[in-house]
């Protein structure tokens, strides 16, 4: 029969332990107000219990294979790298006060851990493994992050539903109004492509800062969300200037990055950096310091309503090996689809003006339509512009018209037209493709020309129009 050993520490400090304090089947209790100081490591083996409502301070590692119930404080105060292997521990407050030399003051966390009360950084780095996450649930706090003193790896902070702008404490501030519960996981300092730093920002090799924030919300945003991201110089990832900074976004689970929100100069003060923008979609966010958001010099890009349509205009001051612009649209700001292509000017040092009309935008079925440009070089390299939006005029929604099948490959049928009305099919730039007359039932059979190009076409009758996609 194993002996149950309870050590109730009533003194403010108890020291003098050997290199490793091993608990092999006993119960050690550290009471509130007491401190158990270990000049070395703690090994809590299977069957052992370490109950702590006071403070456990150690200069070595803590390995738990038994029961670690610590609503109190775990304090790591070594002078060399340390490790916390929590097992199934419950921990309230974790304090890192490692005073080792640079490169020798890291607390490693190889598995997941949740802190119910606080993470306090006084000195040193806390580094999670690539597959581990340190979580601060709603109510738990983070303090002390700064240059050379922050969480590398995955730090997840969860906040309950609320309203207004909220600083999550790990470099992300956003307006959480209407988003429900918000969880933001910051992955930083791992120097790993598309895990802690984005790759392919504008060009295949361009990288962002060594921080990615993954935002998960209870309710998707219904409008653009103001966001501010902050980081320290430690995670600049070799970017020399943030005079022009762009926010970038990728869907959850994706490594395909597209520009989002505005571009501009980041605020740089000493080792701290900050950049604010708005975005209609959250998911994975990061920042890049770029010479320009496009390889061409894009001086203007606007999207505005034009009756039932959207008019897109853009101007370049200069272009280098610019093959084309692909115009993309989205009903939700996340999933984009190409709606037209406009040829570029190749290489030019003079201004060029472009435009494209997106017809009958009420059929996106949303109150706001999102647009962006995909600029493609002659070598196939592609980059994205910032996003623009157009509000849909619900009064322009056609009543009774329908097209099927849509998308199609060769033919479609329009229903709901006026009997005897002319039905016209136009391409994306307004060129005539075909016209037919609706029968007595208001139907029109649209037999598209053989070899018609894929893309978006406009089917008009009277003052009404529908979009037809040819695949």
Image (cartoon, rainbow, N blue to C red):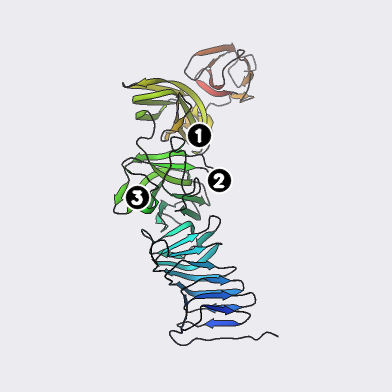
Which of the numbered marks, if any, corresponds to residue 330? 1
Q: Note whether residue 2 is visible.
A: yes
Crowdedness of circle 1 by 10 Å Cα count: few (<14), some, many (20+)? some
Q: Earlier in the sequence, mark 2 or mark 1?
A: 2
Question: Is there a contact, CB below 8 Å, between mark 3 and mark 1?
Answer: no
The quarter of the picture where residue 253 lies is top right
The quarter of the picture where residue 11 lies is bottom left
Which of the numbered marks, if any, corresponds to residue 274? 3
State the residue at coordinates (59%, 79%): 23
Callout 2: helix, strand or loop? loop
- Specify whether 242 is left or right of 47: left
In depth, the one of 104 and 27 nearer the eye is 104
State the residue at coordinates (52%, 86%): 8
Residue 439 location in percent, x, y? 63, 14
State the residue at coordinates (61%, 71%): 65
- Specify whether 381 is left or right of 455: left
Callout 1: helix, strand or loop? strand
Q: Earlier in the sequence, mark 3 or mark 1?
A: 3
Residue 397 location in percent, x, y? 51, 28
Q: Note whether residue 359 is visible.
A: no
Residue 310 location in percent, x, y? 44, 27
Crowdedness of circle 2 by 10 Å Cα count: few (<14), some, many (20+)? few
What is the C-alpha distance between the residues marked 3 and 1? 29 Å
Callout 3: helix, strand or loop? strand
Question: Is there a contact, CB below 8 Å, between mark 3 and mark 2?
Answer: no
- Specify whether 399 is left or right of 301: right
Which of the numbered marks, if any, corresponds to residue 253? 2
Residue 318 location in percent, x, y? 33, 25
């Amino acid at each position: 029969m194993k002996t149950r050993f309870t050590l109730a520490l009533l003194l403010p400090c108890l020291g003098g332990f050997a290199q490793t304090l091993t608990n092999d089947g006993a119960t050690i209790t550290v009471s509130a107000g007491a401190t158990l100081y270990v000049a070395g490591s703690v090994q809590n083996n299977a069957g052992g219990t370490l109950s702590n409502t006071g403070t456990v301070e150690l200069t070595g590692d803590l390995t738990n294979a038994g029961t670690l119930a610590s609503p109190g404080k775990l304090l790591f105060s070594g002078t060399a790298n340390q490790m916390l292997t929590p097992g199934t521990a419950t921990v309230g407050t974790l304090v890192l006060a490692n005073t080792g030399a640079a490169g020798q003051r890291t607390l490693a966390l190889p598995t997941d851990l949740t802190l119910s009360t606080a993470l306090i950084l006084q000195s040193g780095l806390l580094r999670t493994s690539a597959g581990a996450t340190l979580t601060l649930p709603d109510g738990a706090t983070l303090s002390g992050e700064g240059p050379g003193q922050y969480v590398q790896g995955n730090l997840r902070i969860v906040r309950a539903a609320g309203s207004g702008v909220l600083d999550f404490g790990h470099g992300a501030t956003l307006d959480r109004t209407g988003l429900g519960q918000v969880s933001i996981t910051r992955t930083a300092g791992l120097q790993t492509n598309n895990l802690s730093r984005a790759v392919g920002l504008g060009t295949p090799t361009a990288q962002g800062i060594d921080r990615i924030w993954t935002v998960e919300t209870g309710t998707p945003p219904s409008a653009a969300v103001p966001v501010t991201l902050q980081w320290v110089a430690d995670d600049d990832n070799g970017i020399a200037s943030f005079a022009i900074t762009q926010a970038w976004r990728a869907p959850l689970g994706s490594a395909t990055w597209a520009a989002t929100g505005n571009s501009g100069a980041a605020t740089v003060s000493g080792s701290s950096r900050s950049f604010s923008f708005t975005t209609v979609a959250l998911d994975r966010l990061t920042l890049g310091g770029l010479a320009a958001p496009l390889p061409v010099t894009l001086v203007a890009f606007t999207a505005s309503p034009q009756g039932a349509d959207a008019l897109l205009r853009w101007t370049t001051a200069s272009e280098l090996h610019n093959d084309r612009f692909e115009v993309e649209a989205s009903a939700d700001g996340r999933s984009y689809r190409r709606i037209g292509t406009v040829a570029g000017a190749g290489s030019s040092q003079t201004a060029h003006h472009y435009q494209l009309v997106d017809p009958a935008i009420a059929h996106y079925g949303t109150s706001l339509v999102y647009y962006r440009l995909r600029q493609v070089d002659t070598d196939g390299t592609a980059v994205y512009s910032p996003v623009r939006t157009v509000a849909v005029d619900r009064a322009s929604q056609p009543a009774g018209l329908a097209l099927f099948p849509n998308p199609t490959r060769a033919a479609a049928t329009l229903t709901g037209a006026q009997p005897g009305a002319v039905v016209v099919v136009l391409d994306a730039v307004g060129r005539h493709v075909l016209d037919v007359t609706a029968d007595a039932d208001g139907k029109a059979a649209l037999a598209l020309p053989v070899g018609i190009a894929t893309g978006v076409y406009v089917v008009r009758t009277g003052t009404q129009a529908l979009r037809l996609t040819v695949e």
